Image (cartoon, rainbow, N blue to C red):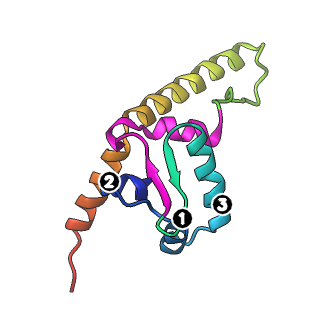
């Protein structure tokens, strides 16, 4: 998604092999992820020699939380080893739920445009000898 976000608007689809080679990720794994993302309406594919994948929406309108929920599935209730019927179990369950809520809000607030910008700033701040 980050590669697609970085190249958004170029008009050039990104090939799976390119992403796989650049990041050392097996192409078969990427195919499965991209199919999930395509099914969720985040990416579109183009067939042929100059084909590949592109974002359907601008990266400013796609949150990390949205994509993670597609790839990782719906939020599961947080498990605790304490009995859910005990006083401490209920307290712990409430605390874990607060943590999950903060995590969810944070992931929803981070867009792929934000991540691309962070990467650019990081690259600009590197010093080369």
Callout 1: SS: loop
Q: Left or right: where does residue 80 sit relative to residue 56?
A: right
Which residue is labeled 2 in the image?
116
Q: Which of these two is toward me, 56 or 71?
A: 56
For marks 3 and 2 on the same chain, the one whose residue lies earlier in the sequence: 3
Compared to 113, does 46 lie above or below? below
For marks 2 and 1 on the same chain, the one whose residue lies earlier in the sequence: 1
x and y, in percent, of residue 124 in the image: 20, 66
Which residue is labeled 1 in the image?
48
Is 84 one of the magenta-colored residues?
Answer: no
Compared to 10, does 22 lie above or below? below
* Residue shown at 49% from the left, 30% from the top: 104
Circles 3 and 2: CB atoms closer than 8 Å:
no
Which mark's residue is nearer the viewer, 3 or 2?
3
* Residue shown at 37% from the left, 61% from the top: 12
In the image, the segment drawn in magenta is 51-73
For the C terminus, which image quadrant? bottom left
Question: Label 2: few (<14), some or many (≥20) within 10 Å?
Answer: some
x and y, in percent, of residue 99 in the image: 52, 29
Which residue is labeled 3 in the image?
29
């Amino acid at each position: 998604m980050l590669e697609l976000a970085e190249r958004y608007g170029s008009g050039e689809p990104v090939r799976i092999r390119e992403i796989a080679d650049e990041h050392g990720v097996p192409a078969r794994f990427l195919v499965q992820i991209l199919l999930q993302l395509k099914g969720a309406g985040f990416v579109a594919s183009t067939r042929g020699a100059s084909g590949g994948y592109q974002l359907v929406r601008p990266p400013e309108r796609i949150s990390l939380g949205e994509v993670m929920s597609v790839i990782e599935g719906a939020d599961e209730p947080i498990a605790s080893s304490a009995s859910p019927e005990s006083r401490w179990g209920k307290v712990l369950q409430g605390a874990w739920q607060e943590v999950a809520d903060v995590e969810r809000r944070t992931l929803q607030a981070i867009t792929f445009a934000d991540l691309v910008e962070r990467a650019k700033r990081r690259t600009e701040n590197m010093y080369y000898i």
